[in-house]
Image (spheres, rainbow, N blue to C red):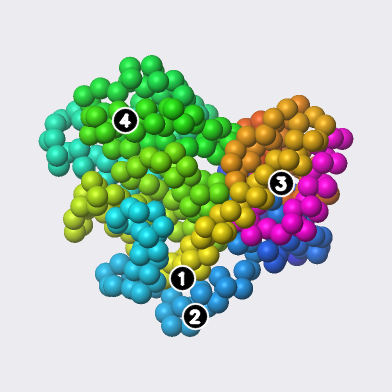
Amino acid sequence: MDNNNIKNLDKEFIMNSYNRFNIVIQKGKGSTLYDIDNKEYIDFSSGIGVNSFGASDDMWINSIVKQLSKIQHTSNLYYSIPQVELAELLIQKSKMKKVFFSNSGAEANECAIKACRKYSKDKYNLDNRFEIITLNNSFHGRTMATLTATGQDVFHKHFDPFLEGFKYVELNNINDLKNKVNENTCGILIETIQGEGGIVLIEKNFILEIEKICNEKDILFMIDEVQTGIGRTGYFFSYEEYNVKPDIVTTAKGLGGGLPIGATLFNEKTENVFSYGDHGTTFGGNLLSCSGAISIVNRIDNNFLLDIKEKSRYFINEISKYKNVEYISGKGLMLGIKTNKKSRELAEQCLEKGLIVLTAKDKVRLLPPLNITYGEINKGLKILKEVIEE
Ligand SMILES: *Cc1c(COP(=O)(O)O)cnc(C)c1O
């Protein structure tokens, strides 16, 4: 099959919900990928921040294949070694207390929303204390609850009525936050850097204010680390930089290194919110996904995080020299580049020349594999420079 065959079959048989780029990726190693015509690409996207150690990483493959040769799935009716190993690792790294495994970012957030409401119900038993505050321009997923939590009108067309009990606050606006928190508020859910929203940083002061209000009023402080987590920003979780202590943390994308997995982490305040039957999933914490995730999380230690920060400085330093770049946003290996050109067109031109980048709103978004080499970075940046300066 050639590129056009595949494109036509896709159009014929697959729901028309993705405006795909015109490329069929066939294989890869690390941050170098190949399409079906064997054209080479440098990967600055890692499948939207998923392939943390790039394509077909040997340690990751070994970890999964070892499990695959034993058994692929047992369900959550039984205890499992990969689940407890991964859970212990995540708890050690995050200093949270407990974890619930699911299959995706949306599911991890769905779990957080349910847990938040149940915490409030159990403790206060009030009819109206179920409101959750999120931020304008946020993104939390595509299920009905997480879509409701998402503070972007573009995602809200067509699907009403939405879930009751969500309010949106303007980013970094403490007055707006104070106006919207009331006796009905049970949780506040934020990203520290809005990914899909265009790599937009939330200010430290605002994050600290949210934590303070949450502590004062026993509102649960929830952080969505689906995109920012697992080393992406140069911290294991991005909130560590601000020294805050969330009550619930969600993560997904980079956790499995390419297999689907989501995790919702709970602290001492929330660790007992679910009892038997309150929440569940068939696939969540699947043995292969957990085995892959163990090999990823194991390698994200302090030295590795320092490497990420250094690569980040290198990217920023180089890109800020390019003509037509207005500014660069983001942290670690989660970067947004604002230029005077359309981001989709830039991404298409990069593809032509052999570089895969993402977009987020009006920015070119870079989420390269965390272990990308300087050789690969330089190859990719050469193309990026040509395209941006053109
Ligand atoms: C991608 C993303 C999600 C949704 O994750 P899925 O795995 O696509 O369900 C939720 N929150 C944030 C911050 C994300 O970047």
Q: CA distance from mark 3 to mark 2?
A: 37 Å
Residue at horizontal 74%, vertical 53%? Answer: 377
Q: CA distance from mark 4 to mark 3?
A: 35 Å
Q: In the rendered structure, which disc, 2 or 1, sits on the residue that comes first in sequence? A: 2
Q: In the rendered structure, which disc, 3 or 2, sits on the residue that comes first in sequence? A: 2
Disc 1: which residue:
291
Point out residue 390 in the picture as x, y percentages from the top left corner: 87, 35
Q: CA distance from mark 2 to mark 1?
A: 9 Å
- Contact flag, marks 2 and 1 (Cβ < 8 Å): yes
Other-residue count near label 1 (Cα within 10 Å), few / some / many at <14 / 14–19 / ≥20: many
Q: Which residues are magenta?
A: 366-390
Q: Where on the picture, by quarter, is residue 53?
A: bottom right
Where 373 falls versus 82 (above or below)? above
Other-residue count near label 4 (Cα within 10 Å), few / some / many at <14 / 14–19 / ≥20: some
- Contact flag, marks 2 and 4 (Cβ < 8 Å): no
Point out residue 84 in the picture as x, y percentages from the top left corner: 34, 68
Label 1 vs label 4, nearer the camera: 4
Point out residue 365 in the picture as x, y percentages from the top left corner: 65, 41
Task: Give the main secondary structure of the magenta stretch.
Answer: helix
Tell me, for residue 66, which label it has, or none: 2
Tell me, for residue 212, which label it has, or none: 4
Tell me, for residue 314, which label it has, or none: 3
SS state under label 4:
helix
Residue at horizontal 44%, vertical 27%? Answer: 205
Other-residue count near label 3 (Cα within 10 Å), few / some / many at <14 / 14–19 / ≥20: some
Whether the magenta-drawn stretch holds residue 367 is answered as yes
Amino acid residing under circle 2: Lys
Q: CA distance from mark 1 to mark 4?
A: 37 Å
Amino acid residing under circle 4: Lys
